[in-house]
Amino acid sequence: MADQCMPGWILAALFGLSAIYYLVTKKKEQRANKDLLEARSESVNSIATTSGECRSSNVSDVDVIIVGAGVAGAALAHTLGKDGRQVHVIERDLTEPDRIVGELLQPGGYLKLIELGLEDCVEKIDAQRVFGYALFKDGKHTRLSYPLEKFHSDVAGRSFHNGRFIQRMRDKAGSLPNVQLEQGTVISLLEDKGTIRGVQYKTKDGLELKAFAPLTIVCDGCFSNLRRSLCNPNVDVPSCFVGMVLENCQLPCANHGHVILGDPSPILMYPISSTEVRCLVDVPGQKVPSISSGEMAKYLKTVVAPQLPPEVYDAFLAAVDKGHIRTMPNRSMPAAPYPTPGALLMGDAFNMRHPLTGGGMTVALSDIVVLRNLLRPLRNLNDAPTLCKYLESFYTLRKPVASTINTLAGALYKVFCASPDLAMKEMRQACFDYLSLGGVFSAGPVSLLSGLNPRPLSLVAHFFAVAIYGVGRLLLPFPSPKRVWIGARLISGASGIIFPIIRAEGVRQMFFPATVPAYYRAPPVK
């Protein structure tokens, strides 16, 4: 009986330590928040461009201005337009994007797509159904299936060309008579007495214009030049992706994403059309070998290729020889918004996580569902005080889902990277073996990764279950001083990975979302 209770006692102790850690740092966070609010005020004032020309707060061109028409912006424009809002979308470039990320939508994200009425946007773009992951390490592999038994047969992940998906959503949003899509570059936000009133932008023809609305939503992506006025952008770049397309390649596990636990870091592969496979090689740090000098091709052939499954080896070398190699920095940024009347951040402009788990679009679509439900009871967005209260609730309501996916992405990336540290080597192997057990041991973590069960407590429980599993393997059948030391280091390393990420995400709102104001608890208007 004592052995069965031991994991529970360990988890209880860990939760107790995390609570003490939170209380000790609470005062420091309050001081930091005060400094951030002062910085926000300075930042907003510095970009104010009204010059006495800002119109009255109750005179607006539209209900909502959306800056950016990527996945978040286009989906949001359609959603708010369908609810009867007058929406003006300003996008820097309305031609089809060409990116090497944002190509895998998890099943949880697909469910949100259905909820928003956008599921047909993955049709007619040669999108591929994805049913789970195949995990490879040292010549062994295990298949991890999404727990889809309780869902309709159409529910699965989807992988596709990012640009095709975005164009389908733009077309659907633009088909609504109350949604205007315009190509232009937003220069700044227009502020009047602490409230954002709209934007100043330059049209495709070079004209500088101003547009006004009671609500401005900034969705201009990971390279956002407006986020500094609305949040504290603490951006981390842990690695870069090197992307290629493998043609006519047969993956070992059809209709699955593939994760190779390589050295020094993971390699991803998944289909993006019926004839193409996306390959993303993670390179730690912010510098990658030079493509123009041939260093990159040499690195891919000599370091990466030998670690790949034999089924994809030839296609990988052919892609390297073809030379269409692209790179993309992998950014991570916790959501740290300034409460700003009249404005809101969404998408990668607001919150980013390592793209290893493909959770970005799921977070964005989940945020849109939350915002839609919040705004539905408000027919008049010009009621600034009420609108501001509802928007503040958005940050609380989104936390459990977004923070679970964000924390998992950051933690898995650190565990999946190769390390000379013996404890981290054991943690990496324990994670692979734990997932290979199947049953609840794989279904739980995969349901988190897929966005089907984004529950913070479940994430923490499974993460430390992996650590305890690793310690148990070290100590059985006969512990030695060295193994005990490594086991202690393993638990310490696991805590050092997950607790800083949780703290950055916000402990209170992540685990205790019951602080939502009473006015939102009424059922949303359908």
Image: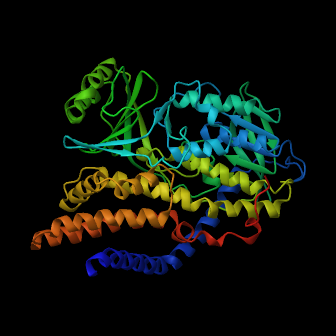
Q: Residue at x 90, y 48 (%)?
A: 59
Q: Residue at x 24, y 33 (%)?
A: 309
Find residue 207 and report its image quarter.
top right
Q: Is residue 345 visible?
A: no
Q: Residue at x 63, y 62 (%)?
A: 397
28, 157: nearer the viewer:
157
Q: Residue at x 54, y 55 (%)?
A: 233
Find residue 223 and report its image quarter.
top right
Residue 306: % across, % down: 19, 33
* Position above or below: 159 against 425: above
Q: Relative to 178, is 184 on the left or the right?
A: left
Q: Relative to 494, is 153 on the left or the right?
A: right
Q: Relative to 520, is 15 on the left or the right?
A: left
Q: Is residue 420 visible?
A: yes
Residue 481: % across, % down: 10, 74
Coloring scheme of the render? rainbow
174, 451: nearer the viewer:
451
Tag count in the figure? 0
Residue 376: % across, % down: 78, 53
Q: Which corner quadrant holds the N terminus?
A: bottom left
Residue 134: % across, % down: 33, 41
